[in-house]
Image: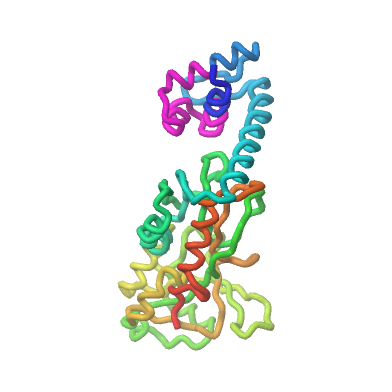
Amino acid sequence: MDYFAAMKSFTRAVELGSFSKAAEECGMKVSTVSRYIGALEADLGATLFNRTTRRLHLTEAGRTFYDRAAQILADLEDARNATSSLNAQPRGLLRINIPGAFGRLHIMPHMKDFLAQFPEIRLDATLTDATVDVIATGTDVAIRIGTLAESSLIARRLAPHTRLLVASPGYLAAYPVLEEPEDLRRHECLAFALQPTNSWYYRPRQGGAEMAEMSVSGHLRANDSDTLHQAALNGLGIALLPTWLVGPDLRAGKLRAVLTGWDWFIAPGPERAIWAVYPPKKVVPPKTKVFINFIAERFGAPPYWEPA
């Protein structure tokens, strides 16, 4: 038995919850993964999984072996990375996880240049708005937007996450002039259905005041920023949207920002930003490091999408 391959097959089967997914990732047949794990069970004299038709469940012995095996493999990877990073070119498969709309607008358009600059890197990009488990899915870098939850992941701030109140010129011409936040009560407000409440929050841009809450209402709410963006362009109301989404429309005059003397938020809380997060390792793999540096440089400071 190739003990290293068996351990790797076993740990990935645990983390992915499937022999077939582990086999696909490791580039082998499902029967090979099953044979490896059977050999491990014979060698250890213990059953590692309670198998059901739907998913795998670790036994107590399986959990004990996984904890030690995963650490051994992580230490080995750290040792390889520490040695190879001394003089090696960034190479290998880079798995990235990106929010859908942001990835389509501000990550994928730059990937042609990135891959041209680092031709020995292969890219596996997953675009999803779900927050994935970076370690369990084998993700090398994830882009997160907003406030970071506490975790063991390492985070690097790439750009601010700024929101503006925006509406089409046609809408603004048909409704009362907006001079103060209270004026929003007389307007159609396009609410984000996934935000905690039907409120927007604001404070004077010059600072020195606590955040205030404004209850908003309108005839349309949606759980997708792209949908609210399109609704604002179509003149359905005022939307509170990130600058990375509406920057080009503001510059083109398709949308206008309103009540710009205040900073606006969809929820109170700590700093919101655009982050790169990656697993904690003693040595950051070169492929991870160059990707994060490349993206940070492309975004710029301030980021290129911010309106003047």
In the drawing, does residue 94 fall left or right of residue 79? Answer: left
Q: In this view of the protein, which residue sits in the foreground, 4 or 109?
A: 4
- Total number of numbered discs in the rendering: 0
Q: Quadrant of residue 289?
A: bottom right
Q: How is the image coloured?
A: rainbow
Residue 97 covered by magenta stretch: no
Which residue extends farthest front? 87
Q: Quadrant of the N terminus?
A: top right
Judging depth in this view, the residue of 241 and 122 nearest the camera is 122
* Residue shown at the point (43%, 22%) measured from the top left: 30
Compared to residue 253, the image places residue 123 above or below, namely above
Whether residue 120 sits left or right of residue 158 in the image: it is left
> Is residue 18 part of the magenta span, yes or no?
yes
Location of residue 283 in the rendering, given as x and y in whole percent from the top left corner: 63, 48
Q: Where the C terminus falls, by quadrant?
A: bottom left
Q: Residue at x 44, y 74 (%)?
A: 304
Q: Tell which of 228 and 185 is nearer to you.
A: 228
What secondary structure characterizes most of the magenta part? Answer: helix
Q: Is residue 101 above or below residue 188?
A: above
Q: Which residue lies at the image location 35% right of the left edge and 76% below the top edge?
A: 249
Residue span colored magenta: 10-37
Place of residue 236 in the rendered image (x, y in percent of width and height, measured from the top left): 34, 72
Which of the pair 202/174 is nearer the observer? 202
> Residue 122, image x and y in percent?
41, 47
Across and down, in percent, residue 154 comes to: 63, 53
What residue lies at 52% left-to-right and 74% top-to-bottom?
301
